[in-house]
Image: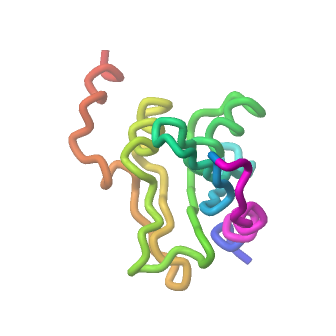
């Protein structure tokens, strides 16, 4: 079993869609990340009736990493729903999550995002946000 298998199994533990209340739906997207030191952190999506209250699985996993280890660099990330990531599916971090990860640590440009679990294909966050506006601040 490789790290991608481990990430998938950890994320899968968090996938069990249900209503938290009449206003919140949760655990319909799950995520696992590998931190710089190799530890694994997970998260799940919480979607509110008002879009501004949504919390993505990727950001929750990253916040778990920060709170529990004070790390900011993510080596690998896997996002899933009812199935593992596959080429035709959209299992990439949303724009807000991409932005969050780059603002958290410029090294997250190198974070590998699983795009196809079966063939173990991935893309880097930096490829999803080329010419990122905030890079200039890191150079100062």
Residue 59, can we see it? yes
The boundaries of the magenta stretch are 6-22
Q: Quick check: 58 left or right of 131?
A: right
- Picture coordinates of residue 59 (x, y %)? 57, 42
Q: Nearer the viewer, residue 129 or 139?
A: 129
Whole-percent x and y of residue 103? 43, 30
Vertical arrangement, residue 76 with respect to residue 137, above or below: below
Q: Estimate the x, y position of residue 20 in percent, counting from the top left.
A: 73, 50
Residue appearing at x 67%, y 49% in the figure? 22
Q: Observer-nearest residue: 27 or 1?
A: 27
Q: Looking at this rendering, what residue extends furthest in the left direction?
A: 131
Q: Is residue 42 left or right of residue 131?
A: right
Most foreground residue, 125 or 36 = 125
Res 107 seen here: no
Residue shown at the point (41%, 79%) measured from the top left: 87
**Is residue 105 shown above or below 113?**
above
**Left or right side of 107 for 26:** right
Per the image, is 5 magenta? no
Q: Where in the figure is residue 124, as x and y percent of width and height?
A: 40, 56
Q: Quadrant of residue 36?
A: top right
| Quadrant (top left/top right/bottom left/bottom right) for the C terminus | top left
């Amino acid at each position: 079993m490789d790290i991608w298998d481990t990430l998938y199994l950890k994320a899968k533990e968090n996938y069990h869609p249900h209503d938290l209340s009449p206003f919140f739906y949760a655990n319909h997207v799950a995520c696992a990340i590998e931190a710089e030191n190799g530890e694994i952190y997970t998260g799940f999506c919480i979607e509110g009736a008002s879009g501004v209250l949504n919390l993505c699985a990727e950001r929750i996993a990253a916040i778990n990493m920060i709170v529990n280890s004070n790390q900011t660099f993510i080596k690998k990330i896997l996002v899933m729903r009812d199935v593992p990531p596959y080429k035709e599916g959209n299992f990439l971090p949303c724009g807000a999550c991409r932005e969050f990860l780059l603002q958290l640590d410029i090294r997250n440009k190198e974070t590998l995002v699983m795009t196809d679990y079966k063939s173990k294909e991935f893309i880097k966050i930096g490829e999803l946000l080329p010419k990122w506006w905030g890079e200039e601040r890191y150079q100062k």
